[in-house]
C-alpha cells in the first residue's frame, strides 16, 4: 500500500508529460531537448507539486501544467549542470552535451527554461503571477547553489554551515517550492504554504545528508551505486566537511594526506577516519533531525491528518524509513 | 536635432539601469553577471521599448521595468552566444567566459534570464501575463535563430530564404518584440501592436542585410570594423549565400575555391566576385525594400504623424539615411 499515491501520480504525470513540448525544427536544438525529456526519471518534483495541490483540494488542470513547468525547469538545471560538470552520463545514458554538443545542450537548456515559464503563464491569472514569482526565486537559488558547489571544489576549507546552505539551495529548495506551487493553486493559506515549504526543505536536506552517508556507509546492493564514489573524487560531503571541521590535528593531517592519495585502500581508510571522528553518527543525527522537523512542519498544516498520509509515506520512503 | 529623443531615452535608461540587479554572493556568479551589464552598449532594445510605449501614451514605471527586462534578456543571449561562438571579445572587452570561466558565464546568463522574468512579473497584472507571453515567444525564436546560425556554419548549401529566416529569428524579432511590449503597456490596440512589430521586424532585417553589405562594401573609416572580416571567416552572409545561389557554374566554382583559400587577396577577390554576380546591388535592394516596408508599417499605426517622428529618425539613423 505504501507509496501507492506517489506511484499513481508518477504514472499519470508521465502520461501527461509524454507529449511533444517543442517544434520539430531546428532539429539540432529540439532533438537535444526532447532527448533529455525522453530519458525519464522518477518525476519526484512534479509529483510533489501534485501532492501539494491535492492536500488542499482537487487536482486542477493548472496543477498538471505547473508540474510540467517544474519538470522542465528541473531538466534545464540538469542539462546545464552536466555541461559545467563535464559529466558524460546521466541516468545511465549519455548526457545531452555528450550525445549532441555543448552548444546545442546549452540552448536546449535555455528553451526548456523558457518553456517552463510558458506553462506557468498559461495558468489562471489568479495565481499565474504568484507561480512565476516562485519560479523566479527558486531559479535564482538553484543557480546560486550550483555556483557554490563549484566554488567548494576549489576551496580547501568549507564550513559545515556553508555546505548545508549549498545543498539547501542546490537541491532542497526546488522540492520545497514544488510543493508550495501546487498548494498555491488550490488556494492554501500563506501559513500552510510556508509549513509545506518547510516540510519540503527539511525533507530535501534530510535526503541529501542521507545520500552523503550512504555513499560511505550504505549497502551497495540496496543503494545502487558503488560505495565510496564521493571519497574517490574527494567530493565535499557532509562527512568530509564535518570531519575536517571536528577532527583533532593528527586526524586532520591524515585526512588531508588521504585527499592527495589515490591508492586502492583510499576508500576504506577514509571510512575508518570518518568513523573515528564519529561523523557517521553526526550525519545520522542530522538526517534524523531534518526528518523530524519535516514531519513537524507537515503536522502543523491545517488539514485533516488523513490528507497528509501520502506525503508522510513518501517522506518515509525517500528516507528508507518504512512504516 | 535628429536622434535627440533616442539619445535622451538612452541616457535616462542607462541611469535607471545602472543599479545593482543581483545580490553580492556568490561572487563567482554575480560578479560575472554584473561585469557583463557594466560593459554597457547602445541600449537600442530597451529604448525601442520606451519609444514603443511613448507612441501611445506617457511613459509609465512599467515601461522602464520592461525595458530593463529586455536588456537583461538581450545580455543573457549575448553571454550564451559568446560561449557557443568561443568569442574572446565583445565591445572591445573580454567576454564573460574569457574573463571568468565558462561555467560562471553559463550560470550568469541563466540568472539574467530569470531576472528578466522577475522584472516583467513585477508589472501591473493587467499586462504582466501578456509581457511574459511575448518574452516566452521571442526567447524561443532567438534560441532557434542561434541554432540555425550554428547549423549554417556546418552546411555547404544555405538558401537565401533560410538565411533571411535565420537573421529574422536571431536579430529582428527582438527589436520587434521590444517595440510591441512597450506599446502593450500603454494600451495600444492589437492592430497597432502588429504594425509596430512589423515595423521593428523589417527595420531589423534591413539593418542586418546592410551590416552584411557594409562588411564588404562599407567605408572602414565610418563602419568601424576592418572590411572583409566576414569574408576572411567564410561567414554565411546575404552576399555569400545569394552569390552561391545565383552565380553561374564558373563563378560558383571560383567562389567555392576562394572559400578554401586564405591568401592575402582573398577579400579583394571575393568582393570582385560579389560585384560580378551583382549581389551587392541585390543586398542594397533588399535593404531598401525592408526599410520601405518598415516605414509603411509605421505609417499604418493610428496615431498622429508627429508622434512617429522619433521612430522615423531612429530608423533613418540606423540605416544611415540621414534626412
Image: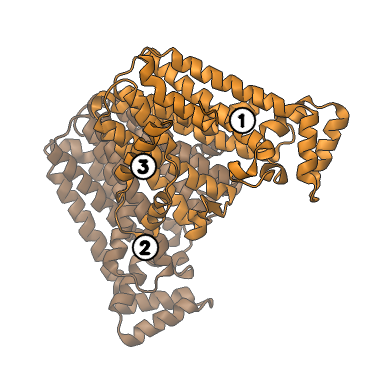
Chain colours: A brown, B orange
**How far apart are labels 2 and 1 at the CA level?**
56 Å
**How far apart are labels 3 and 1 at the CA level?**
32 Å
Q: Name the residue located 56 percent from the left edge and 47 percent from the top edge.
A: B84
Q: Secondary structure at mark 2?
A: helix
Q: Is residue B130 visible?
A: no
Chain letter of disc 3 in the image: B
Residue at the limit of the structure toward the right, as seen here: B250
Figure check: A146 above or below A67: below
Figure check: A317 above or below A309: below
Which mark lies nearer to you, 2 or 1? 1
Tell me whether the residue at label 3 lies in contact with that at label 2, contact meaning CB atoms closer than 8 angstroms. Answer: no
Q: Secondary structure at mark 3?
A: helix
Please tell me if label 3 and label 1 are on a single chain. Answer: yes
Question: Label 3 neighbourhood size at 10 Å, few (<14), some (14-19), many (20+)?
Answer: many
Residue at the limit of the structure toward the bottom, as seen here: A250
Considering the image in quadrants, where does the N terminus of chain B appear? Answer: top left
Give the total number of marks visible in the rendering.
Answer: 3
Chain letter of disc 2 in the image: A
Residue at the disc numbered 1: B209
Residue at the disc numbered 2: A212
Q: Is residue A87 visible?
A: yes
Give whichever of A6, B39 is nearer the camera: B39
Query: Residue B277: x, y in percent?
Result: 79, 28
Label placed on residue B114: 3
Amino acid at each position: 500500500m505504501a507509496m501507492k499515491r506517489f506511484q499513481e501520480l508518477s504514472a499519470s504525470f508521465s502520461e501527461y508529460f509524454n507529449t511533444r513540448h517543442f517544434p520539430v525544427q531546428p532539429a539540432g536544438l529540439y532533438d537535444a531537448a526532447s532527448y533529455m525529456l525522453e530519458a525519464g526519471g522518477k518525476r519526484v518534483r512534479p509529483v510533489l507539486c501534485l501532492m501539494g495541490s491535492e492536500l488542499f483540494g482537487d487536482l486542477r488542470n493548472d496543477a498538471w501544467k505547473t508540474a510540467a513547468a517544474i519538470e522542465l525547469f528541473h531538466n534545464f538545471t540538469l542539462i546545464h549542470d552536466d555541461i559545467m560538470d563535464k559529466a558524460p552520463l546521466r541516468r545511465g545514458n549519455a548526457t545531452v552535451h555528450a550525445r549532441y554538443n555543448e552548444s546545442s545542450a546549452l540552448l536546449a537548456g535555455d528553451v526548456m527554461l523558457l518553456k517552463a515559464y510558458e506553462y506557468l503563464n498559461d495558468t489562471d491569472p489568479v495565481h499565474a503571477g504568484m507561480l512565476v514569482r516562485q519560479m523566479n526565486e527558486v531559479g535564482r537559488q538553484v543557480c546560486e547553489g550550483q555556483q557554490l558547489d563549484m566554488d567548494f571544489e576549489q576551496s580547501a576549507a568549507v564550513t559545515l554551515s556553508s555546505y548545508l546552505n549549498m545543498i539547501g539551495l542546490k537541491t532542497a529548495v526546488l522540492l520545497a517550492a514544488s510543493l508550495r506551487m501546487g498548494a498555491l493553486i488550490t488556494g492554501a493559506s500563506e501559513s500552510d504554504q510556508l509549513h509545506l515549504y518547510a516540510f519540503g526543505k527539511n525533507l530535501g536536506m534530510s535526503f541529501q545528508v542521507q545520500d552523503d552517508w550512504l555513499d560511505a556507509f550504505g549497502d551497495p546492493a540496496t543503494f545502487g551505486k558503488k560505495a565510496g564514489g564521493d571519497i574517490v573524487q574527494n567530493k565535499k560531503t557532509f562527512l568530509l566537511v564535518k570531519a575536517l571541521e571536528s577532527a583533532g590535528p593528527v586526524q586532520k593531517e591524515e585526512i588531508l594526506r588521504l585527499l592527495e592519495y589515490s591508492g586502492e585502500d583510499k576508500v576504506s581508510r577514509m571510512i575508518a577516519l570518518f568513523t573515528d571522528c564519529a561523523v557517521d553518527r553526526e550525519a545520522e543525527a542530522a538526517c534524523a533531525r531534518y526528518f523530524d522537523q519535516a514531519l513537524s512542519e507537515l503536522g502543523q498544516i491545517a488539514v485533516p491528518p488523513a490528507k497528509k498520509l501520502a506525503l508522510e509515506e513518501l517522506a518515509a520512503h525517500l528516507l528508507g524509513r518504512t512504516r
